[in-house]
Amino acid sequence: MTRDAETPAGLPHPDLVAAIPRLRRYARVLTGDPARADDLVQDTLARAWEKRRLWQAGTDLRAWLFTIMHNLHVNQLALFRREAVNVSLDSDAGGGAWQIPVRANQVDRVELLEVVREMGRLPPEQREVLLLAAVEEMRYEEIATLLSVPVGTVMSRLSRAREKLKKIVAEPPTGLRAVK
Amino acid sequence: MKPAAQPIEDADLHAYVDGQLAPERLAAVDAALLREPELAARVAALRELNAALRDALDPILAEPIPERLLAAAATPRARSSAGRRWLAPLFAAAATLLIGLGLGWTMRGMLLEEGGTPTTFARQAAFTHALYAADVRRPVEVWANEEKSLVTWLTRRLGHSVHAPDLNALGYALVGGRLVAGNEKPTALFMYENADKQRLSLQVRKDARHVGAPAGGTGDTAFRYAVENGVGVFYWVDDECGYALSGSVDRSQLLALARVVYGQLAALDAIEAAPARR
């Protein structure tokens, strides 16, 4: 009989698999589109393997993967925008289709639908800060490092995003308020 | 009314609801919230927004993972020598699997003959897995086509909400489940099977003490691994329950499965807990 604690060494495959759901969620928030999101996750995983020697065992794998994903997305967006200029000026490069379905068992909570819809109207850089701070519960300093921006920028994006969204939970349409 | 020094800023409120406010500011914000109802209302709205965002986005974590992403996590892009070196563990895993399959039956006999009562959760989980997984025709009492009533039944018998995680994305389909005897409390067992007829079982018990949770700790533990007579077991404690995922598959594969199980159950708990939070 053998028994031991789980100690990751190198870039362990199980840890990568375990990170996939969070990567998918981040990608979904960035792109707003499930298929494009999964493409982004796939690219991120491939890049993680290529750069696996740069990951330091024991450090936060999630933050490392998120950084890779963020940078990939920014680069892809820049490329997409350059191409889009020649095609159509009014195409929304930030993610035309915003499809984050709210599950059937949640539809009784009207504000969830609203929150998701309004989140789609935020600029991608505000959406991602909101996800990282409010949902992933990352520290502001970590987020700043991840996005390569000053902490002040993280705070102002977060503040703007929340300013737009909090109206939904604070002032829901009359009669539609979920029972508290 | 308002103190002249240290006005409460927007950034303070964000940090406050995100649990990141510097300890030395905490008292000032707490005091201001008691004093100023509109400030308290803003904090409440921000909290509610955080909760709504989590409730809206947590279900994504429970979605089955597409095959292509699992493949992307498993295989680096073919790259000359580096690529070949990374194949070695795969062959090792395949070999382990074959050996495991071969040993399965032998182990079953050994386990069945072994005297005494299994003591640890991992040991008992491995024993129970070997016993039922080897049963080709009747591994479970209630089959997967009655999953809903299975889950209801097990929830009732355990006195705790249980779920059968969806492992289809990892190639394992739910076979069904049964109630099994634990040391003192009943244990729920869900059996899964892949295309190669390799079986896994997830066992859930509402009794963290017997799982080996450190006394006086928060109760939750990291994944731990044990091999009991050839059956690998990852077990952990989450909330009030002990979980054990057992199978004769290689350790890294089992860990990957255990993490998916853990992630799905955590996401489901978050959804269930949502109405209570409001």
Image (tube, coloured by chain):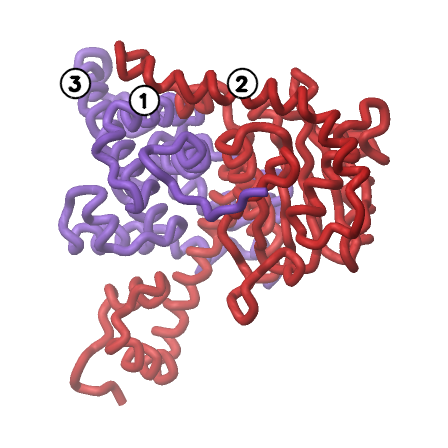
Chain colours: A purple, B red
Task: Say few, some or many: other residues with alpha carbon within 10 Å of mark 2 (under 14 / 14 to 19 / 20 or more).
Answer: few
Q: Label 1 is placed on what type of residue?
A: Ala
Give the mark nearest the N terminus, 1 or 3.
Answer: 1
Residue marked by disc 2: B95
Q: Quadrant of residue A93?
A: top left
Q: Chain of mark 2?
A: B
Q: x and y percent of residue B21 in the render?
A: 28, 68
Give me the C-alpha separation between circle 2 and circle 3.
50 Å
Label 3, secondary structure: give it. Answer: helix
Task: Say few, some or many: other residues with alpha carbon within 10 Å of mark 1 (under 14 / 14 to 19 / 20 or more).
Answer: many
Q: Residue at x 82, y 33 (%)?
A: B140
> What is the number of the mark on residue A46?
1
- Is A80 drawn above or below residue B225 in the view shown? above
Q: x and y percent of residue A27 in the render?
A: 37, 32
User: Which one is in front in this view, the residue at disc 2 or the one at disc 3?
Assistant: 2
Q: x and y percent of residue A139 in the render?
A: 28, 56
Give me the C-alpha separation between circle 2 and circle 1.
26 Å
Q: Label 3 is placed on what type of residue?
A: Arg
Marks 2 & 3, CB-CB < 8 Å contact = no
User: Which one is in front in this view, the residue at disc 2 or the one at disc 1?
Assistant: 2
Q: Label 2 is placed on what type of residue?
A: Ala
Residue marked by disc 3: A82
Give me the C-alpha separation between circle 1 and circle 3.
24 Å
- Is A147 drawn above or below residue B65 in the view shown? below
Of residues A178 and B167, which is closer to you in this image?
Answer: B167
Q: Residue at x 58, y 39 (%)?
A: B261
Marks 2 & 1, CB-CB < 8 Å contact = no
